[in-house]
Image (tube, grey):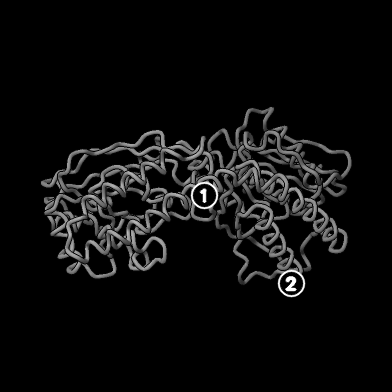
Amino acid sequence: MPKCPSHICALIPTYNNAGTLADVLRRTYHFVEGIIVVNDGSTDGTQQVLQDADMPLHVVQLPVNRGKGYALREGFRKAKRLGFTHVITLDSDGQHLPEQIPALTDLSLMHPKAIIVGSRTLAGKDINAGSLFANKFSNFWFTVQTGLRLPDTQSGMRVYPLEALHGLNFITARYEAELELLVWAAWANVKIMPCPIDVFYPPQEERVSHFKPAKDFTRISLLNTVLCLLALIYGLPRRYWRSIYFGILVLLVVVPFVIVSIVYDVLKGLSIPVRDNYHRLFSNICRLLIALMPPGSRVKRLPKITDTTPAVYIANHNSLLDTLAMMSVNPKVVILSRRWVCNHPLFGIIARTADFPSADEGVDVLLDELKPLIEDGYSLLIFPEGSRSRDGRLASFHAGAFYIAQKLKLPVQPFLLHNFYEALSHNEFRLGKAKMTVDMMPLLSQQDVGLANYRQLAIKMHNEYLKLLKSC
């Protein structure tokens, strides 16, 4: 089993879990060589377990129990002194499965500046009603305080980039500090991403729990009260100022453009040839919005195609901003959309006026729709993944784009979009800091496309995108 990269270490805070600690350490060592254990004032046989461990450990001893939040903070400091850049945390009670470490670290390698939060699969698990309520309670207030939806804010299995934690302070020192840390990180515009994980819950009689319902729930309620007040005067304005600015900008630009689109749609109905003029206007509007994006959220590299030779454009699909960027590349482009886009109350009139074809009509109808557009010099943009990525990973490519290129005897022009997910991801409407780029990849000529098996070509291009995204 391959180890995690050397810049990632495991951090395991422990308090009176001697019965499970040895097994957790052994299984963790299969995946991570650097392991930091914070012994938070344990009074059972924990010290002996650590002494008997047959693996190298970095142990932080706390003379008395200070709480999980305090233990994590000491562990982060130790990791930084040892030269690690990322820390994966897991509990010592056996609930978190070390076998899930690769899933979290793989996502962390794709998004090294993000906090990766393990989202536990709770369906079918033997969990008491109080714990389920506490989880939903925390998720609700986290959304209120940050505007970000996370499926499991109480999961302690996470990957932290230590750089992102710089300057973040804990108000609390016990287990609710993990929730607090997520809130402060969200306010500091640190990307927070969920990653599905499985967990193990032993029978109720075998569990060791340090949760004191009345005392801890009161402390969580007080913390949420403080965080809600801070969210109003500090957290939400800091987190969303870019989104507010860009949202106002979009309304000021898009609403008049919708009105103009209605006029153009009427002219089209009168058989007046306005398509080219409308597409040039559409492309210029997209370029204007991109140029006016707030500092820290700019597209640093955006090609502009002047050659009007028709082609099938393909691109990876991470964000709503992808369409904005790709419509800026070439005004003579139509986007393969879904029926709901054309029926959208705001954007539907734009899609219809721009003659965006629908993928829901069936391939034969679609090809007949596309032929006059291609003859008029228009290219077709298709996102081979089909829908936006939910976690920034590149999904499998559908073969439809390459089939259409073969049938219409067109070359395929691939584009690589980078960092768009970091700017605006699927699970939140927040414009984050990102240096976005759009790069043209080598053209696949009409001959190359025509001679290839279109399904194999889809797999080949998917692998090419994966290789390039890993090297970025």
Q: Residue at x 65, y 69 (%)?
A: 125
Q: Nearer the viewer, residue 16 or 267?
A: 267
Tell me which corner region of the image, top left, top right, bottom left or bottom right, holds residue 464: top left
Q: Nearer the viewer, residue 224 or 98?
A: 224
Tell me which corner region of the image, top left, top right, bottom left or bottom right, holds residue 265: bottom left
Q: Secondary structure at mark 2?
A: helix
Q: Amino acid at mark 2?
A: Ala
Q: Secondary structure at mark 1?
A: helix
Residue 199: x percent and y percent? Answer: 63, 60
Q: Nearer the viewer, residue 217 or 123?
A: 217
Reply above or below: 4 against 455. Answer: above
Mark sitting on residue 248: 1
Q: Nearer the viewer, residue 80 or 241?
A: 241
Mark 2 or mark 1: name the one nearer the start of the chain.
2
Kindly identify which residue carries mark 2: 129
Residue 382: x percent and y percent? Answer: 28, 54
- Using residue 289 as the reference point, say whether residue 6 is left or right of it: right
Q: Residue at x 60, y 42 (%)?
A: 190
Mark 2, mark 1: which one is toward the viewer? 1
Mark sitting on residue 263: none
